[in-house]
Image: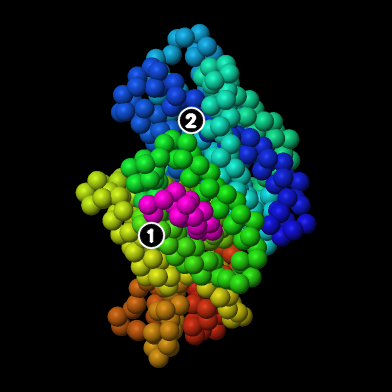
Amino acid sequence: MPAAFAPFRHPAFRLLWFANLAANIGLWVQNTGAGWMMTSLDPSPVMVSLVQAASMLPVFLLALPSGALADIVDRRAYLIGAQAWVLTVAALLAVLTYAGWLGPWGLLVFTFAIGIGNALNFPAWAATTPELVPREDLVQAIALNGIGFNLSRAVGPAIGGFAIGLAGTEAAFALNAVCFLVLLLALIAWKREAPRSALPSEHFLGAMRAGVRFVAASPAMRAAILRACTFFFFTAAIWGLLPLVVRQGLGLGPEAFGTMLGVMGVGAVATGFALPALRVRLPTRGGMVTVFSLVSAAALALLGVSGHWAPAALAMLLFGAGWIGAASTLQAAAQFATPAWVRARAIGIYQLCFFGALTVGSVLWGWAGARFGIAPALLIAAVACAGAALAVRGWRLDGTPATEAPSVPMPKPEAPAAELGPLLTDRSGRVLEVVRYTVDPADRAAFLAAMEEARRVRLRTGAVAWRLLEDVAHPERWIELWAVESWAEHMREAGRLDAADRAALARAAAFHRGEGPPEAARYLSVRA
């Protein structure tokens, strides 16, 4: 099988990819039908624009909560529930439309409800991809997901328009329900091997806090978010200004606007298939994102100076290539930076950030177009996009090269006293963990550097606070303190450590000078 299609070797990925393609087509059919119906119910520009806002607002509101839910409940059951919600709302929307009982505000309510289902689906679906393919196929699997999205965007509106012309907007809404039924049946057929744990599930609010702490303490995840925000903020200029470029700059109509989007889709699909070969020439994810960002910047500049449809179409072809190349590589970097236990909520935070950058960028570049003119705004965006891409290229997306962990005794606390056993639950209150080190003062600087990485490990795996204390009378004595929310959260810590985390903790423990390993203890919070 060609490398571009390698993820299709895996039956589960193949099944869910085609089912998700059907659901994405249904989503574009739904958006087309809702926008067209609003022009009949209330043709004011504000109400028509609110249709798009109602479909996207749930993404901002629910990205982190939906990611936390997808991590703490069975993901297959969660996805089935999300598709069942969309299917039910879409079917009810079709029935009410057919009966003529739906007004403009009712349409917005149903559009928002469908957006809720999609917002619940996004982080869980992104976190599911690593379960469907091995690590070596993950980047191309994400690229194929992007290809599927661009294919659905190319054919979905056309199918929606045909359905509306043939049988009315209720037909478009009914078709959306059928498309989500396909995905629902595929998820039911998917035989997922869910990980089992003897520990109770995380609490919802605690899971969200753990996700935020993980992202804040993960340099690779922060780099992926920063570079995604940089890329999407500047390239949002095309989304905000393309309709005006076509209408005012080129003097063309809506057919040309659709054609430009179609050309962009062609560039995206072709580049998605070429990504395996491109990765041979650009082996680092950071280098890939930089190159595709520069390609997108060139597309912005070319579109800004275009006075004819031909160079404008070439610009959109280049933009499609740059868009899918950078977007799929960035999402792959975010996937690689997150372990399974926190993946959905971390991806939810990632999606929240890049959707926010895209939305804010569209508004600001639209303002720049009105203030300075369409062509100058695009040229400014192009220069800024290229400059920003070069400025942030030092933020690594490939992680830190693995180093061998020293073979040293690791701290191990004593077993809990039997009489305290009933208190050691998920409602125990905070647990303070302590490790005491004896370090040669000559190694102080190196020890502090090792402990800085240990701090990030503790925070990534659940610590709500961390401190390192030095004895003022005996500079060789050090105490590391960190607190977790409960005994159950403390028990989860060990399972959250990966090989790189254990190596970082071992490097810190290697500085201990004593007959045995560093002394470790645990203290339970009590009320006086």
Is 175 within the magenta? Answer: no
Vertical placement of 434 versus 70: above or below?
below
Vertical placement of 400 versus 486: above or below?
below
Task: Please give the label number shown on residue 301.
Answer: 1
Q: At label 1, which amino acid type do we have?
A: Ala
Q: How many marks?
A: 2
Residue beneath disc 2: 31
Q: Tell me what residue is drawn at x 40 percent, y 29 percent.
A: 51
Q: Position of residue 184 (x, y in %)?
A: 65, 31
Q: At label 2, which amino acid type do we have?
A: Asn
Q: Position of residue 522 (x, y in %)?
A: 47, 61
Q: Which residues are magenta?
A: 306-326
- Which sits in the foreground, 266 or 217? 266
Q: Earlier in the sequence, mark 2 or mark 1?
A: 2
Q: Tell me what residue is drawn at x 63 percent, y 50 percent.
A: 144
On the rendered structure, is 84 left or right of 296?
A: right
Count neighbours of disc 2 (C-alpha within 10 A) and say few if under 14, some if 14 to 19, many if 20 or more: many
- Which sits in the foreground, 68 or 365? 365
Q: Tell me if residue 119 can be seen.
A: no
